[in-house]
Amino acid sequence: MSKPYLSLSLDMDNQWSYMKIHGEEGWEEYPSYLDIFVPHALQVLEELDLKITFFIVGQDAAFEKNHQYLRQIADAGHDIANHSFKHETWLHLYTKDEMKAEIDSAHDIIHEVTGKAPSGFRGPGFSWSGTLLEVLAEKGYKYDASTLPTVIGPLARLYYFSTSNLTKEEKEDRK
């Protein structure tokens, strides 16, 4: 009996990224839970005989403390994708040069650490723009998964901006 086809993915938003989004102190120290989460997730996926796409944040790949966990994902045969370098949900406001630098820096370090060149991308907070699609096409990416094609996407962004600890000026600048 063959398995039905479906697509599963996981955004590897680390502890620091949530702290940053909510304005919590200490995020600049980049606390991580990858050491706990990755082995557990890989065990569950192995038990279920599933392969998924992991969207990896470049900043996490830049830290040596995370290398073994990111390599474990790749070594287990999962798809490796790019989730930006700095994980900023206002990515859609970047200039083309800023966006290219953001995508390239994440791409390069993720490839170096995992041994797999990402061919897919998802913007943080499902952030996307025409400029992003241009940059990804120029880079040769096969797909972009930045949109959440339901009513949940806009509601999720509204929730993010209403509950984050950004100042009013930051919220207006980043919408």
Image: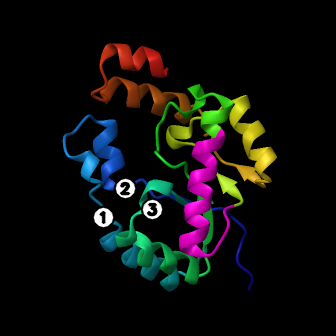
Circle 2 residues within 10 Å: few <14, some 14–19, many ≥20: some
The chief SS type of the magenta part is helix
Coloring basis for residues? rainbow
Amino acid on which disc 2 is placed: Asn
Q: Is residue 122 visible?
A: no
Could you give the CA–CA distance between mark 1 and mark 3, rounded to whole angstroms? 15 Å
| Viewer-side residue, 142 vs 151 | 142
Amino acid on which disc 3 is placed: Ala
Q: Earlier in the sequence, mark 3 or mark 2?
A: 2
Q: Is residue 12 visible?
A: yes
**Residue 111 forms part of the magenta stretch:** yes
Q: Position of residue 109 (x, y in %)?
A: 55, 62
Could you give the CA–CA distance between mark 3 and mark 2, rounded to whole angstroms? 13 Å
Q: Is residue 116 left or right of residue 168?
A: right
Q: Position of residue 60 (x, y in %)?
A: 42, 60
| Viewer-side residue, 155 vs 107 | 107
Q: Which residue is mark 3?
A: 62
Could you give the CA–CA distance between mark 2 and mark 1, rounded to whole angstroms? 7 Å
Q: Which residue is mark 1?
A: 33
Residue at point 44%, 25% (across, down): 158
Marker count (numbered): 3
Amino acid on which disc 1 is placed: Tyr
Say whether marks 2 and 1 touch (CB < 8 Å): yes
